[in-house]
Amino acid sequence: MASRQQSVRVDGRRLRVTSLDKVLYPESGTTKAEVLEYYQAAAPAMLPLLAGRPVTRKRWPDGTGSGDFFRKNLEDSAPGWVPVAEVQHSDHVNTYPLADSAAVLAWFGQVAALELHVPQWRVDPGAGRPQPPGSVNPDRLVLDLDPGPGTALADCAQAARWCRELLDSMGLPSVPVTSGSKGIHLYAALDGSYTSEQVSEVAKELAKALEKDHPDDIVSDMSKDRRRGKVLIDWSQNSANKTTVAPYSLRGRNRPWVAVPRTWDELEDADSLEHLDFRQVMERLAEGTDPLAGFGGSPDGPAEDALSTYRAKRDAGRTLEPVPETSPSLRAGDPLFVIQEHHARRLHFDTRVEHNGVLVSWAVPKAPPLKQGAQRLAVRTEDHPVEYAEFEGTIPKGEYGAGEVTIWDHGTAQIEKWEPEKVVVVLHGRPGGGLDGIPRRYALVKTGKGTEKDQWLIRLTKNQPKAQSRPDDAGTAPGTAKAPGTAAALPHPLPSPMLATLGKPSDIRGDGWAFEAKWDGYRAIAAADDSGTVHLRSRSGRDLTDTFPELTELAEAVPAGTVLDGEVVALNSQHRPDFGRLQQRGRLTKPREIERAAKRIPVHFMAFDLLHTAEHGDLTGEPYARRRELLAEVLSPTKRIQRPDDLGQELEHAMEVSQKLQLEGVMAKRTSDAYHPGRRSEGWVKLKQAQHADVVVVGYRRGNGGRAKTFSSLLLAAENDGGELTYAGRVGTGFSDSQLKALRKKLDRLSRKSPPVDDVPAEDASDAVWATPKLKAEVAHSGVTRDSRLRHATWRRELK
């Protein structure tokens, strides 16, 4: 039976598509139509990273549950408008497609090319003949961090941070990409001054240097027998003949994971880091989160106007939004402004001001502030046509920004300053509009640098126009005001969690600090509305309500209209947080599985901050000490909803209690500080608790280089309750030169021919010198792996 065909128009091109309901990801039920939808949504972010690069496709015509194959040459069935590049290999020429438009990405989806692989160099558009690989110097360096057996994504995140330090010292700021498969890719932009061979050599030396610094955690060669318990830094991706899966490409795994650019802040919380699927990536892009935006350069191409990005994201045949084909032009009269309430995946307020013929736009999670001096996050988005100032209606499902759009306020703007990083405008709205018909002066200030370059703040300035003030101005955004009959209304959207900086005890200076336990769980905002419905949102905005149904107890614990900040944790049999158990819950999606797991692995919500109540309204501007007082008054603990006491105001005592309770660490919070949603603050400092373990040394591995006369690492064992020794891993850092020499002498006196434990992996035993287990020691570590190995062990001292 022939596949049903239909013709669609994408980015001005006609494309025949077939079998849109074919399931390409059997486990998730993801169809070809959804794959095409994703690549259209990702096109604005993805195309600049693909431009000029020959694309090798990995195809799954019958879905990821069936066979796959790589394809280099352009398919005979490809539309005539797909651009190509000829590449001269050693004994043949391949004709590769180039991705220059959303239409080409749609065609890739049509032929089930789920993975798109590209080199680190671009073709020369004016060459006029087949080009050898790397004939144009690469414009980026790539490191592939691949977890070996016994390691995980969290270990790759640690390795990425070490790589970042070296790259930063070389003047090469980098951006991490969770690969959607196993590990992490790191990208650093180059200026094209060096050949692929030179870049490969630099990457190789970098990997070797990190292996030398972290011999127990990093390996720089591909030997499989050396990779257990380590992260491979694969530097070979920089070879002119190699390709890497493109950022924003789908992966041909059991679920539609994506190679996603991430922020370094996301990698700080490595234990909660996970691969993302295409829906999560679409949500990030819709919110303006694109850490690789502006990365590197693009080859010369057709001239673009200010609305090119806007047009690329919309299909004029499907959406009612205005999609003008002509370039923008200047309009006579006062500049316009519009603020549109946009109920997309998350409610936000699109704030747009006319400038140079377009509406320059920012997405504001809450409406622009109405209280003098108040400020909110504003994310710069693509320019919109001036006609958009009158748009209200429904953006259909599947289109960019799908959802309801209504005009919150509109009118004219008086532009007082327009600079690349600062805009000051007075907005004159309509009577009855969101600005209450009062002229209001706003300053928009760019704050983001590098990967966060689209991040701004919008602030209602203290010096307002004379007609501005009004005694009953409550200074709250829609959804937060306590209007008649809605006293328990929640803020919309729910605020994003405030973030802490990673620090050390010496960073805590002076008085005015309080200390809380640092829980090893999922950070979450929890709220109860006046209908008794509970809302649970993760740090990234993911809805966790159905994932943890037992936490609907919140409706019994707090009054309606309450918003809390806290942590979802799972406890082990010793009543200690166990992130592994929590992850088992977090991965489940099917209702029956969740219901069964809720009985087997119940979770708790540890509430540590209060952000909103029906009685007091928005509390984020209140000092931490006041918010904690009110939290004690508002929250009545239940079996699953708890309010842990703080650990006092003495850091040493707090660290001791944290260690005794085997917690992840301590949170230091300045008692006078307000709460800054979605922002990282030095008023919250994260102090990680190094865990300590008593171990027995059972041998050592031979050293080389500067450690040729001592050892590279010690082999450790732990004693169980029955007095038996089991292998606990290695420790290779934390030694002084004198300790290295002294320990080697002691171990040589204790040498024996056979291992004193029988569960040492072959990789560690291959060059081991065994020792009678008499030398006892204390090491610090960051946790224990599933096979009972100490993670990131550091030597502390010998025990007498």
Image (tube, rainbow, N blue to C red):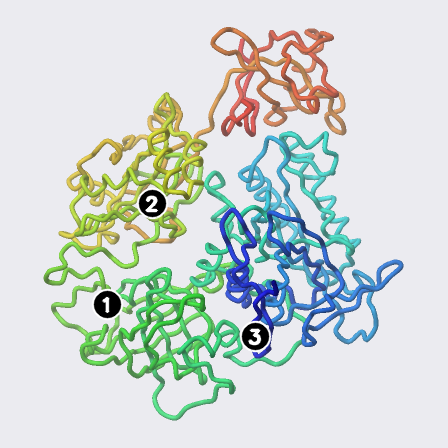
Q: Is residue 692 visible?
A: yes
Q: Residues within 10 Å of mark 2 (few under 14, many from 20)?
A: some
The residue identified by callout 3 is 7
Q: Residues within 10 Å of mark 3 (few under 14, many from 20)?
A: few
**Cα distance in 3D space between marks 2 and 1:** 35 Å
Choose between 790 and 560: the one closer to the eye.
Answer: 560
Choose between 555 and 768: the one closer to the eye.
Answer: 555
Image position, residue 207 (x, y; %): 70, 42
Query: For the point 36% across and 50% down, which residue is it?
Result: 543
The three-letter code of the residue at mark 2 reads: Asp
Which element is circle 1 on? loop
Query: For the point 79% across and 61% down, which residue is it?
Result: 134
The residue identified by callout 1 is 370
Q: Which mark is residue 609?
A: none
The reply to whether dot 3 and dot 1 touch (C-beta < 8 Å) is no
Which element is circle 2 on? loop
Q: Earlier in the sequence, mark 3 or mark 1?
A: 3
Name the side, left or right, on which 633 lies relative to 68: left
The three-letter code of the residue at mark 3 reads: Ser
Name the side, left or right, on which 47 lies relative to 525: right
Query: For the point 48% across and 38% down, which residue is it?
Result: 271
